[in-house]
């Protein structure tokens, strides 16, 4: 459902110009720019997928899975997800969470091969595919843009896309009313972007084995800290990151955990923008 404020601005989804109600003056006009980021981060989320009718999935696999991290032989760590699309079909993807450019030319083919291996192991019949899907998008802008007066970058362009997950829908929906009130959020957004980027930089610095241990540790956090990092504000994100570090430091340490702790404390040696 559209926010009442969004509805007041007229035909939003189909045109690129919002129409102001007549009682508003030209000075109230706000151009909301939802094009892709002007300076995209040179790090992308890439996936290959297929759409299957439900009967291609054995009954025991007909449940939504957001992150199946069980390793599949391939050049880089991937995760698998499958979700029902609500019309009797399912979307199944093999995804690389974040990969720096330049991308290997045959990356989608490699992911397709990995997807088929995974589905074979799950007893899912990929020969019944009715469509294929290729994902390839930047994980947001290099920095939160400073907009000229009367313009507001929104969504992926404005840095709402979480650089460590590729998700943005929740944050964009939550920001609609604030945006239409033109309440300045830039400082908060810049801080949040910085913290989330630190997470991305840590991920990009880890080799496949520590990468998986990192996620095991992260998903072992209390739920409020998981959600705090995934869609929280600055305070919740900071609290989640500190909780992650203290959890790691308190556990019996081995070489892999030491590596993750060191990488996390140095906020990732890899920084795609510097
Ligand atoms: C398979 C898949 C599953 C996903 N699942 C989730 C999920 O569960 N939750 C979640 O939060 N996110 C998910 N995402 C990510 C989500 O789709 C993006 O975060 C979201 O689409 C970003 O929205 P946006 O409107 O800001 O940008 P976009 O969706 O990228 O929209 C940008 C628009 O600008 C248009 N455009 C491009 N160039 C120009 C131009 N020069 N002039 C005018 N218009 C232009 C494009 O055509 C496009 O319509 C998923 C992505 C994929 C691919």
Image (spheres, helix red, strand yellow):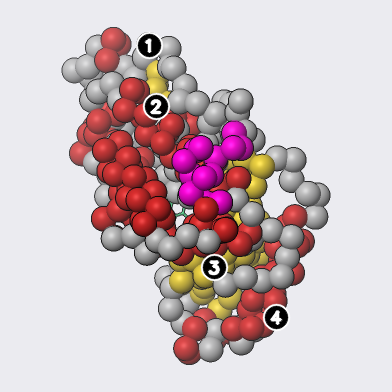
Which one is earlier in the sequence, the residue at label 3 or at label 2? Answer: 3
Q: Secondary structure at mark 4?
A: helix
| Nearer to us: label 3 or label 1 | 3
Q: Is residue 231 left or right of residue 264?
A: left
**Picture residue at 28% right of the left edge, 21% below the top:** 184
- Does label 3 or label 4 sit earlier along the sequence? 3
Some atom of ligand 1 lies within 8 Å of the CB belonging to the residue at label 3: no
How many marks can you see? 4
What range is drawn magenta here?
Answer: 259-271
Mark 2 and mark 1 in contact? Answer it, CB < 8 Å. no
Between marks 2 and 4 in the image, the one whose residue lies nearer the viewer: 2
* 262 w.r.t. 93: above or below: above
Q: Residues within 10 Å of mark 2 (few under 14, many from 20)?
A: some
Other-residue count near label 4 (Cα within 10 Å), few / some / many at <14 / 14–19 / ≥20: few
Q: Residue 270 appears at what percent x and percent y?
A: 61, 37
Q: Which residue is mark 1?
A: 149
Q: x, y (%) of residue 123?
A: 61, 87
At 48% from the left edge and 49% from the top edge, which residue is drawn?
Answer: 261
User: Could one spot residue 98 in this view of the protein?
Assistant: no
What is the x, y in percent for residue 144? Answer: 45, 25
Q: Earlier in the sequence, mark 3 or mark 1?
A: 3
| Residue under numbered circle 2 | 190
Position of residue 205 measured from the top left corner of the image (x, y, whole percent): 60, 45
Give the mark nearer the N terminus: 1 vs 4: 4
């Amino acid at each position: 459902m559209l926010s009442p404020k969004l509805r007041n601005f007229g035909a939003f989804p189909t045109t690129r110009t919002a129409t102001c109600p007549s009682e508003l003056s030209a000075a109230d006009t706000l151009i909301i720019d939802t094009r892709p980021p002007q300076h995209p981060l040179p790090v992308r989320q890439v996936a290959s997928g297929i759409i299957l009718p439900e009967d291609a999935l054995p009954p025991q696999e007909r449940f939504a899975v957001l992150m199946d991290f069980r390793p599949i032989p391939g050049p880089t760590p991937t995760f698998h997800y499958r979700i029902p699309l609500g019309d009797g079909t399912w979307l199944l993807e093999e995804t690389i969470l974040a990969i720096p450019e330049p991308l290997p030319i045959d990356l989608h083919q490699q992911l397709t091969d990995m997807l088929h291996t995974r589905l074979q192991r799950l007893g899912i019949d990929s020969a019944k595919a009715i469509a294929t899907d290729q994902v390839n998008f930047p994980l947001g802008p290099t920095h939160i843009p400073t907009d000229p007066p009367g313009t507001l970058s929104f969504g992926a362009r404005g840095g709402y896309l979480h650089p460590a997950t590729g998700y943005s829908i929740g944050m964009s929906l939550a920001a609609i009313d604030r945006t239409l009130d033109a309440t300045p959020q830039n400082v908060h957004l810049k801080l949040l972007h910085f913290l989330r980027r630190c997470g991305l930089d840590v991920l990009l610095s880890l080799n496949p084995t520590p990468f998986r241990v990192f996620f095991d540790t992260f998903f072992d956090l209390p739920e409020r800290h998981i959600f705090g990092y995934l869609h929280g504000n600055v305070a919740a994100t900071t609290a989640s990151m500190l909780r992650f570090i203290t959890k790691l430091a308190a556990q019996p340490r081995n070489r892999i955990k030491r590596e993750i702790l060191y990488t996390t404390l140095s906020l990732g040696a890899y920084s795609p923008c510097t």
